[in-house]
Image (cartoon, helix red, strand yellow):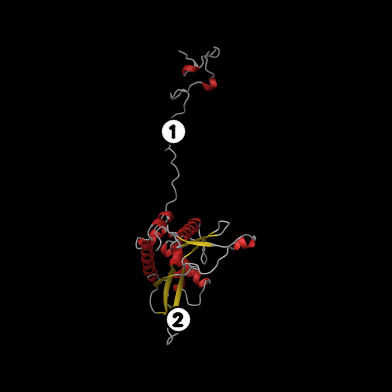
Amino acid sequence: MCRSIADGGRRCPGTGPAKSDTPLASAPKLSRVGVDTAPPSTASPPTSPTPESAPSLNPETENFNILLTADPKEWLARPWKLRKKIIEDALGEAVEILMEHPDVKNEGPGYVYDSAPTFDRWSQSTTTLGKARLSYYTAAPHRFTRTIELSDKRGRYAEPRTLAILLAHELAHTLAPPSAAHGETWVKMFRLTQAALQVPETSTSTHTPTDIEYAAELAAAKKKRENAPWQGTCPQGHAYARGRKPAGRYSCRPCLEDRKPATITFTRNENRGGGKK
């Protein structure tokens, strides 16, 4: 028996079009094999693309891996004392890995390194994040000791990934000859260090603060101004801060340039939020 198209059948030969209130273009499709659907496919369903897998990390460098994988905001929220400990331990782990590398040489024409690189101190430098020092003996100018110092003031605002790249950068200086600077020999050691420690490819000799690092420095500077013992304002509302009681008279430079009253009035800050009294 013939059935109407609307009921899922086919029009019988010699009959007119099936009468239906539903246009054929919008007629409901019934899931019946051989009527209006294709036979089920035997191919496996398409799979969603999988994200790229994270680079493999060296299981022997636990603290260094923290620098490579930590979230920047969570990292900066940790106490600075704890972060310093992680950085120092990460440097020690990196040195152990590199000293066992077959391409690392501790001597060359005209120089000998007495020992493995070591951490020296946290400096108060505000110009560089870190520095590698090669020191020689007066009685034996060809014998060098190598140490690394890091900036306390700038390091506390650096992202963990920035610190990982920094350690690789400075370690490359301690592995290259004393006169290598940032030449081809140093670049070769830096690439070797990157590969051994799974540090991502990046620029080799300079660093530009990221937005997160810049914002962290601005927030710290603002907090320092708010907690300063002496707060000053000029007649136009420009704010100033001093750690000690200002002696003498101070003037506001922008107001002087605009030929406006510029004398700054300082008052003792009685609402310091956690600063030293």
Asked which secondary structure carries label 2, the reply is strand
Measured as percent of width and height from the top left, residue 192 is found at 45, 67
> Of 174 and 258, which appears nearest the observer?
258
Left or right: residue 135 compared with residue 263: left
Q: Residues within 10 Å of mark 1 (few under 14, many from 20)?
A: few
> Of 74 and 79, which appears nearest the observer?
79
Q: Which mark is residue 41?
A: 1
Measured as percent of width and height from the top left, residue 138 is found at 44, 86
The quarter of the picture where residue 41 lies is top left
| Residue located 52% across and 22% down the image | 26
Q: Residue 185: in sight, yes or no? A: yes
The quadrant of the picture occupied by the C terminus is bottom left
Which residue of the protein is positioned furthest toward the bottom in this rendering?
139
Left or right: residue 233 compared with residue 88: right
Amino acid, disc 1: Ser
Measured as percent of width and height from the top left, residue 16 is found at 55, 12
Q: Label 2: which residue?
A: 111
Amino acid, disc 2: Tyr
Quick check: 2 above or below 201? above
Give whichever of discs 2 and 1 has the lower sequence position: 1
Q: Residues within 10 Å of mark 2 (few under 14, many from 20)?
A: some
